[in-house]
Amino acid sequence: MLVDGLSQRALEDELALLRQAFDSLPAPVWREDGQGTVRWANRAYLLLSDAFGDGEDCLVWPLPRLFPHEAAPPTTPRRLRLARAAGPLWFDCHSFVLTDGALHYAQ
């Protein structure tokens, strides 16, 4: 199969832009598979979950869960609490069902 170099470069550039955009968001964003395992998360989520092991080059795996898993993510926003030593943090969470799992945003 032949690959068009310009098309490949455009796809790589777009992927890099999307990664940079999601990692610069101040709000946590994460993806769970159908079993509720966190498969991907942006930087805000990783910082909240203490997923960085010995520095930002080393992630704890599997990624820690910040919020409880819901068998069927609701299609309406909901309020979730994250317990912290300094006091709870409250988030408005939005979920979107995907083919195999869900994508979640917390503000």
Image (cartoon, rainbow, N blue to C red):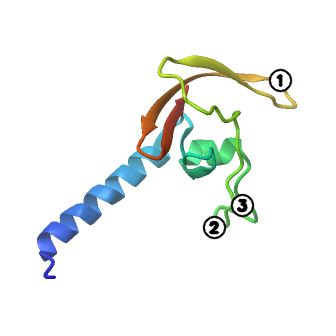
Identify residue type, mark 3: Val
Between 15 and 32, the one nearer to me in the picture: 32
Q: Residues within 10 Å of mark 3 (few under 14, many from 20)?
A: few
Task: Give the x, y percent position of residue 46.
Answer: 64, 48
Q: Is residue 66 left or right of residue 74?
A: right
> In this picture, is 100 found above or below 13?
above
Quarter that holds the C terminus: top right
Residue underneath mark 2: 57
Tell me: 50 left or right of 19: right
Q: Amino acid at mark 2?
A: Asp
| Amino acid type, residue under disc 1 in the picture | Gly
Which residue is disc 3 drawn over?
A: 60
Identify whether 31 is placed above or below 80: below
Question: Is 19 left, or right, of 89 in this rendering?
Answer: left
Q: Which one is earlier in the sequence, the residue at label 1 or at label 3?
A: 3
Q: Residue at x 39, y 46 (%)?
A: 21
**Badge 1 vs badge 3, beta-carbon distance below 8 Å:** no
Of discs 2 and 3, which sits in the foreground?
3
How far apart are the alpha carbons under marks 1 and 3? 24 Å
In space, the residues marked 2 and 3 are separated at their CA atoms by 10 Å
- Which is more N-terminal, label 1 or label 2? 2
The x, y position of residue 40, in whole percent, is: 54, 52
Vertical placement of residue 77 versus 15, above or below: above
Q: Quadrant of residue 13?
A: bottom left
**Residue shown at 50%/29% (left/top)?**
95
* Disc sitting over residue 87 in the figure: 1
Location of residue 27 by image quarter: top right
Where residue 60 sits: x, y (%)? 71, 60
The N terminus - image quarter: bottom left
Q: Secondary structure at mark 1?
A: loop
Q: CA distance from mark 2 to mark 1?
A: 29 Å
